[in-house]
Amino acid sequence: MDLLAKGIALAGCAIGAGLALIAGIGPGIGEGNAVAKALEAIGRQPECKSSVTSTMLLGCAVAETTGIYGFVTGLLLIFVAPGLFIDKIV
């Protein structure tokens, strides 16, 4: 029974880490769309380049934090959580 519990805990950590790392897809798509729309706006009105660029960079920075949070969560599930779960089971 102890071996089965360890296996289930490790499998849960691995599946959770995989799902957490999928979070990197969203920011990539969102930032690509933001840059595309910013380029369209600059192409239509070149005089507002500085305000569009600064707003786009701020938005990309905020969107990137979502991917970083997912990455950190995945790393914690891979390297930290299995040890914590195994210590609790034993």
Image (tube, helix red, strand yellow):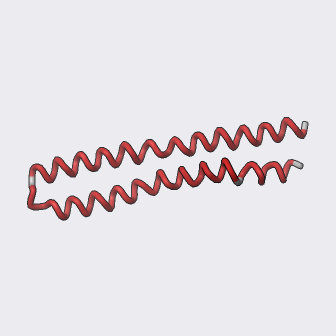
Q: Quadrant of the N terminus?
A: top right
Q: Position of residue 84 (x, y in %)?
A: 77, 54
Q: Is residue 17 left or right of residue 8?
A: left
Q: Residue 62, relative to residue 4: is it above or below? A: below
Q: Compared to 68, does 28 lie above or below? A: above
Task: Tell me what residue is drawn at x 62 percent, y 44 percent.
Answer: 17
Q: Is residue 78 left or right of residue 53?
A: right
Q: Residue at x 67, y 47 (%)?
A: 78
Q: Is residue 31 above or below residue 4?
A: below
* Residue at the spot 42% in from the left edge and 54% down from the top edge: 64
Residue 4 position within the rendered picture, expressed as x and y whole percent measured from the top left: 85, 35
Q: To which quarter of the image does residue 26 belong?
A: top left
Quadrant housing residue 3: top right
Q: Taking 24 as reference, is 55 above or below it?
A: below
Residue lying at 16% horizontally and 51% vertically, measured from the top left: 41
Q: How many marks?
A: 0
The location of residue 45, given as percent across then percent down, is: 9, 54
Q: Position of residue 14 (x, y in %)?
A: 67, 40
Q: To which quarter of the image does residue 58 belong?
A: bottom left
